C-alpha cells in the first residue's frame, strides 16, 4: 500500500502550489507533511486523495497509476481539518454513512453495519456517544468521530488534513499519542498535514518538510533535526541562531568562535563565506574564569533569563565579536540542572562556546549592481562540531 | 412582579427602546390594518359571515387561490433550488446576467407580467398556439394562474436558498464522496438536509405571495366564476358592489387560512432545526 508522487506540478492561476514534487511513502508508514501555511502540503494531500488533479506528474498507489482516478477507486479515508461531520446525522449515522452509501449489492446487512459501527466507536473510545449529534460533542470527540467515519470504509490509505489544528493544546497532545497508537494497531499507510513541527516530530515516523511548493527534506524526526538538509529546514525546525563566518585552515571562524571542521568535510575554498546555524541548546555557557579555555572564548552579558520549566532560556548580548545575522541577541537554552549549577544573574558576564554549528557556503552574486546579494547555497550542508 | 422581569441582563444598550419601537412600528404597519379587517367583518355577525364565506363561488375562489399557490410554490421550490444550484456551483459565462434576471419578477409591475404571460399563453399566443392542438390550454384556465404564480414566486426560493448554498462548505460533499456516496446520495443525504430550512422559508414566501397575488393573475386567468376566479378578485368585485363587510369577510377567511398554513410550515422548520441542535 505504498504511495508514490512523481514530478507533480499543480498551479492555481499564476500561483504554483506544487513544483515538481517527488515522494515515496512505504506501506504502513506514518508520514507528516510539514511546512508553513501556503507551502502546498494540503494541496499535495488533496492530489493524493483525488480531490485535486495535478497539471503534470503522476500519483501511484501501490504501484498503480491513479493520477486521474476517481476518489472512490483510490480507497482513501480522508479526515478534514474542520471534521466535516454531517450535522443532521447522529454520531452513529455519520460513521455508518460510508457503509450505507455502498451500492446495494456490496452493502452489508443492517446488522453487520451496526456491529461494525459500534466496533469503530469502541476503537475511538466513544461508544457512549452514538446517539448524539455532532453539535453536542467537543472538538476532540468530533475529530475522533471523523476518524472513525473515515476508517469505516476500510481504507488502504488514511489522509488527515491538519487533524489537530483546531483543538486546544492539552487535547491535541492526548490525540497525537492516541493517533500514533491507533496507527500501530491498524498499520494503514497514513499521511497527515501539519504546520506544527512538534506535532510532526512526536507522531510521524518520517517527516516531509515542504516550502513554497517544493520538498526541502524527507527524513526521520532525528535526521530532520540533527542533519537539516537546507537552510530552510535549519530555521523552520526548532529555534536557531544564525551566524556569518568563513572557513580558514580547516576551521570555521565566526567572530571569535573557532570550530574544527569534521574529518569528512570535503575541501572548501579557503576564505569561503559561510552561514552558520546554532541551536540554543548547542551553546555552552561558562564562567569566564572557570577554566583556562574559557578565557579564550567570546563573552557576553546576560540580558534576560526565562525559566521554561524543564529548561532555562538565556538571552545574551555578545560583548566580543560574534557575527550574528539579523539579531543582536543570542539565544541559549540550558537544562534546569546546568542553569542551577551556573547560578547566573541578569547583567553578569559569561563565556560562550558553540558545540555544533550547521553551516552552508554562502554564494555571493552581484546581480544588484553594487549591493552584494548573499545567497545561502542549499547544496552543501555541513556540520562543525567542537571537540 | 415587574414588567421587565423577563428582561435578561445584557451589554447591548437600548433594550426597552428597541422593543418599544418594534411593537409600535409593527402595530401601525401590520397589526392595526389587519385587525381592521376583523373589526369590519364583525359587523356581519357569525351567521352572515358563514353564509358569505361558504357560498359556492367563494369556496371555489378560495380553492383556486390556495390550490394554485401551493402548486406554484412546490414547483418553485424544485426549480428555484435548481436555479440557485446552477448559479452558485456552475460558474458559466453570463452568470451575473442570469443572476440579475432572477430579480426581475420582483421589479416588474405585476400587470405587465400578467399581460406578457397572457400574450404568450393565450390560445393564439406564441406558445399557446402550439399547445392548443395538443389539447393543452394554459391561458384563461387555472393552469394559467399557476404559470403566473410560478413567475411571481421564483425569486423568493432562489434568493433564500442561494446564500445558504454559497456558505455550504464543499468539505461536506467531499467527505460524502470520499466515503463512497454517489452524486445523488450526496445531494439527498448531505446537501438537501442543510438546505431544508432555507427551502421551506422560500416555499412559504412564494406561497404567501401567490395567495395575495392579483395583478398578474387576473389577465391570464380568464376569471370564470367557479373555474378560474381567484379570491382577491372576488374581494375586489364585492368592493365594487359596495358590499364592504362581505369583502372583508373573504379577506378574513384568507388571512386565517394563510396564517394556519404558514404556521404549519414554520412548525415543520422548527422541528427540523431543533432535532439536531445542541
Image: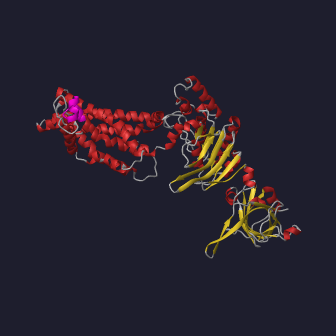
Q: Is residue A323 magenta?
A: no
Q: Locate residue A207, reporting x and y percent.
A: 69, 49
Q: Quadrant of residue A303?
A: bottom right
Instruction: Judge left or right: residue B28 versus residue A382.
Output: left
Q: Quadrant of residue A344?
A: bottom right
Q: Locate residue A103, reporting x and y percent.
A: 52, 28
Q: Is residue B184 visible?
A: yes
**Colouring used for the render:** secondary structure
Q: How many marks?
A: 0
Q: Quadrant of the N terminus of chain A?
A: top right
Front one among A185 and A62: A62
Front one among A366 and B193: A366
Front one among A72 and A136: A72
Q: Is residue B140 magenta?
A: yes
Instruction: Judge left or right: residue A25 versus residue B162.
Output: right
Instruction: Judge left or right: residue B272 versus residue B239.
Output: right
The answer to whether residue B114 is above or below residue A380 is above
Q: Who's the residue at 69% across and 45% down the image?
A: A203
Q: Locate residue A121, reporting x and y percent.
A: 61, 32
Q: Who's the residue at 24% across and 32% down the image?
A: B143
As drawn, the residue found furthest toward the right would be: A292
* Region in magenta: B129-145
Instruction: Judge left or right: residue A133 versus residue A373.
Output: left
Q: Locate residue A363, reporting x and y percent.
A: 69, 67
The answer to whether residue A201 is above or below residue A86 is below
Amino acid at each position: 500500500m505504498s504511495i508514490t508522487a512523481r514530478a507533480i506540478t499543480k498551479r492555481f492561476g499564476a500561483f504554483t502550489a506544487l513544483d515538481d514534487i517527488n515522494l515515496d511513502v512505504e506501506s504502513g508508514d506514518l508520514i507528516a507533511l510539514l511546512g508553513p501555511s501556503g507551502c502546498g502540503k494540503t494541496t499535495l494531500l488533496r492530489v493524493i486523495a483525488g480531490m485535486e488533479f495535478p497539471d503534470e506528474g503522476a500519483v501511484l498507489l501501490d504501484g498503480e497509476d491513479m493520477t486521474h482516478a476517481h476518489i472512490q477507486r483510490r480507497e482513501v479515508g480522508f479526515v478534514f481539518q474542520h471534521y466535516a461531520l454531517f450535522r443532521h446525522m447522529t454520531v452513529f449515522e455519520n460513521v455508518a454513512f460510508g457503509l450505507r452509501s455502498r451500492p446495494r449489492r456490496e452493502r452489508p446487512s443492517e446488522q453487520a453495519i451496526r456491529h461494525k459501527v459500534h466496533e469503530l466507536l469502541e476503537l475511538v473510545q466513544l461508544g457512549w456517544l452514538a446517539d448524539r449529534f455532532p453539535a453536542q460533542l467537543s472538538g476532540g470527540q468530533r475529530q475522533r468521530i471523523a476518524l472513525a467515519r473515515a476508517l469505516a470504509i476500510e481504507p488502504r490509505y488514511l489522509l488527515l488534513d491538519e487533524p489537530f489544528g483546531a483543538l486546544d493544546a492539552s487535547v491535541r497532545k492526548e490525540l497525537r499519542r492516541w493517533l500514533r497508537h491507533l496507527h500501530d494497531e491498524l498499520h494503514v499507510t497514513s499521511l497527515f498535514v501539519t504546520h506544527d513541527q512538534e506535532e510532526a516530530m512526536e507522531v510521524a515516523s518520517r517527516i516531509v518538510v515542504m516550502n513554497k511548493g517544493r520538498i526541502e527534506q524527507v527524513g526521520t524526526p532525528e535526521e530532520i533535526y540533527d542533519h537539516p538538509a537546507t537552510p530552510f529546514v535549519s530555521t523552520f525546525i526548532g529555534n536557531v541562531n544564525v551566524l556569518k563566518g568563513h572557513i580558514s585552515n580547516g576551521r570555521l571562524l565566526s567572530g571569535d568562535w573557532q570550530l574544527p571542521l569534521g574529518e569528512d568535510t570535503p575541501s572548501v575554498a579557503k576564505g569561503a563565506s559561510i552561514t552558520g546555524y546554532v541551536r540554543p541548546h548547542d551553546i555552552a555557557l561558562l564562567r569566564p574564569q572557570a577554566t583556562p579555555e574559557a578565557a579564550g572564548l567570546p563573552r557576553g552579558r546576560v540580558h534576560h533569563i526565562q525559566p521554561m520549566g524543564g529548561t532555562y532560556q538565556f538571552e545574551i548580548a555578545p560583548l566580543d565579536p560574534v557575527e550574528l545575522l539579523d539579531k543582536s541577541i543570542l539565544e541559549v537554552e540550558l537544562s534546569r540542572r546546568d542553569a542551577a549549577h551556573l547560578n547566573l544573574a541578569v547583567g553578569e558576564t559569561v563565556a560562550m562556546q558553540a558545540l555544533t554549528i550547521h553551516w552552508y557556503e554562502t554564494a555571493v552574486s552581484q546581480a544588484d549592481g553594487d549591493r552584494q546579494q548573499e545567497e545561502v547555497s542549499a547544496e552543501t550542508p555541513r556540520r562543525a562540531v567542537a571537540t | 412582579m415587574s414588567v421587565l422581569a423577563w428582561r435578561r441582563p445584557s451589554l447591548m444598550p437600548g433594550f426597552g427602546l428597541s422593543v418599544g419601537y418594534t411593537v409600535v412600528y409593527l402595530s401601525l404597519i401590520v397589526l392595526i390594518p389587519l385587525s381592521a379587517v376583523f373589526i369590519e367583518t364583525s359587523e356581519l355577525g357569525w351567521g352572515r359571515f358563514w353564509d358569505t364565506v361558504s357560498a359556492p363561488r367563494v369556496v371555489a375562489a378560495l380553492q383556486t387561490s390556495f390550490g394554485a399557490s401551493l402548486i406554484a410554490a412546490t414547483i418553485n421550490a424544485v426549480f428555484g433550488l435548481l436555479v440557485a444550484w446552477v448559479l452558485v456551483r456552475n460558474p458559466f459565462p453570463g452568470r451575473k446576467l442570469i443572476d440579475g434576471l432572477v430579480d426581475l419578477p420582483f421589479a416588474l409591475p405585476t400587470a405587465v407580467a400578467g399581460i406578457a404571460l397572457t400574450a404568450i399563453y393565450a390560445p393564439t399566443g406564441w406558445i399557446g398556439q402550439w399547445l392548443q392542438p395538443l389539447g393543452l390550454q394554459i391561458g384563461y384556465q387555472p393552469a394559467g394562474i399557476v404559470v403566473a404564480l410560478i413567475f411571481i414566486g421564483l425569486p423568493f426560493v432562489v434568493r433564500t436558498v442561494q446564500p445558504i448554498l454559497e456558505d455550504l462548505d464543499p468539505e461536506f460533499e467531499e467527505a460524502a464522496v470520499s466515503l463512497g456516496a454517489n452524486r445523488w446520495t450526496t445531494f439527498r443525504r448531505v446537501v438537501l438536509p442543510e438546505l431544508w430550512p432555507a427551502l421551506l422559508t422560500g416555499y412559504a414566501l412564494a406561497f404567501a405571495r401567490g395567495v395575495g397575488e392579483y395583478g398578474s393573475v387576473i389577465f391570464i386567468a380568464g376569471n370564470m366564476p367557479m373555474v378560474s376566479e381567484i379570491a382577491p378578485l372576488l374581494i375586489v368585485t364585492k368592493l365594487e358592489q359596495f358590499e364592504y363587510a362581505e369583502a372583508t369577510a373573504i379577506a378574513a377567511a384568507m388571512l386565517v387560512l394563510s396564517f394556519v398554513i404558514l404556521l404549519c410550515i414554520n412548525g415543520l422548520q422548527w422541528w427540523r432545526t431543533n432535532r439536531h441542535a445542541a
